[in-house]
């Protein structure tokens, strides 16, 4: 196995800013408690490909409902690698819990963005059976898998990122 990345928490200041932007009704002291409880993603077994991201909050989603979740996590990784994020397979199987962008792509240069590379997840319960998805704080809801990628032989891109969602096309 190649060891190519390291998970970290974003700073408390960045987390507070992003959490209040997403959940404005949350008291400042509660945000600090949520932040302190965040654990870095980890694999469940030595044979697991995915690193489990735990939810920082309890949430319940009825069919067709979605939620944006600031995870409090960032990742530094070697150039030439990407972190691909998917719903935990059990949640996908039971509730058709889906990432709103199908697969979350975390590029290696996102770490250096002006939001500290804060990883967000936007998930939706796409159940056709009327099932309500319930996720408890501290339980896994998303998994990230590191994948190596290549570029074309004539690639000449020199642009640099400074931002999050959609910033590479601005």
Image: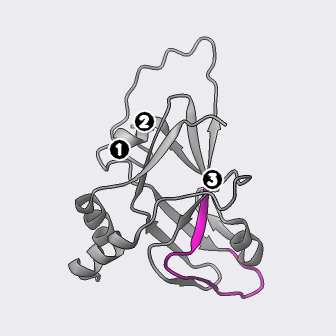
Q: Is residue 77 above or below residue 65?
A: above
Furthest toward the front, the residue is: 46
Quadrant into which the N terminus falls = top right
Q: CA distance from mark 3 to mark 1?
A: 19 Å
Q: Position of residue 41 (x, y in %)?
A: 52, 59
Q: Position of residue 63 (x, y in %)?
A: 65, 82
Callouts 2 and 1 close, C-beta under 8 Å: no
Q: Quadrant of residue 28?
A: bottom left
Q: Left or right: 134 with respect to 12? A: right
Q: CA distance from mark 2 to mark 3?
A: 18 Å
Mark 1 residue element: loop
Mark 3 residue element: loop
Q: Is residue 129 magenta?
A: yes
* Extent of the magenta region: 126-143
Please tell me which residue is depicted at 65% across the width and 66% down the height of the picture. 98
Q: Would you name the residue on which mark 3 appears? A: 103
Q: Would you name the residue on which mark 2 appears? A: 109
Tell which circle, 3 or 1, labels the residue nearer the N-terminal end.
Answer: 3
Callouts 3 and 1 close, C-beta under 8 Å: no
Mark 2 residue element: helix
Please tell me which residue is depicted at 51% across the width and 62% down the height of the picture. 121
Q: Nearer the viewer, mark 2 or mark 3?
A: 2
Q: Nearer the viewer, mark 2 or mark 1?
A: 2
Q: Main secondary structure of the magenta part?
A: loop
């Amino acid at each position: 196995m190649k060891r190519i990345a390291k998970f970290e928490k974003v700073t408390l200041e960045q987390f507070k800013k992003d959490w209040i932007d997403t959940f404005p009704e949350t008291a400042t002291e509660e945000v600090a408690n949520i932040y302190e409880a965040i654990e870095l993603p980890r694999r469940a077994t030595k044979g697991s490909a995915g690193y489990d991201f735990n939810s920082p909050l309890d949430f319940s989603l009825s069919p067709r409902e979605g939620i944006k979740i600031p995870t409090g996590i960032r990742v530094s990784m070697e150039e030439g690698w990407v972190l691909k994020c998917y719903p935990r397979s059990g949640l996908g199987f039971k509730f058709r819990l889906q990432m709103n962008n199908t697969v979350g792509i975390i590029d290696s240069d996102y770490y250096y963005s002006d939001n500290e590379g804060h990883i967000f997840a936007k998930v939706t319960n796409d159940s056709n059976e009327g099932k309500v998805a319930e996720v408890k704080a501290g339980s896994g809801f998303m998994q990230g898998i590191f994948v190596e990628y290549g570029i074309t032989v004539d690639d000449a891109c020199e642009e640099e990122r400074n931002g999050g969602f959609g910033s590479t096309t601005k």
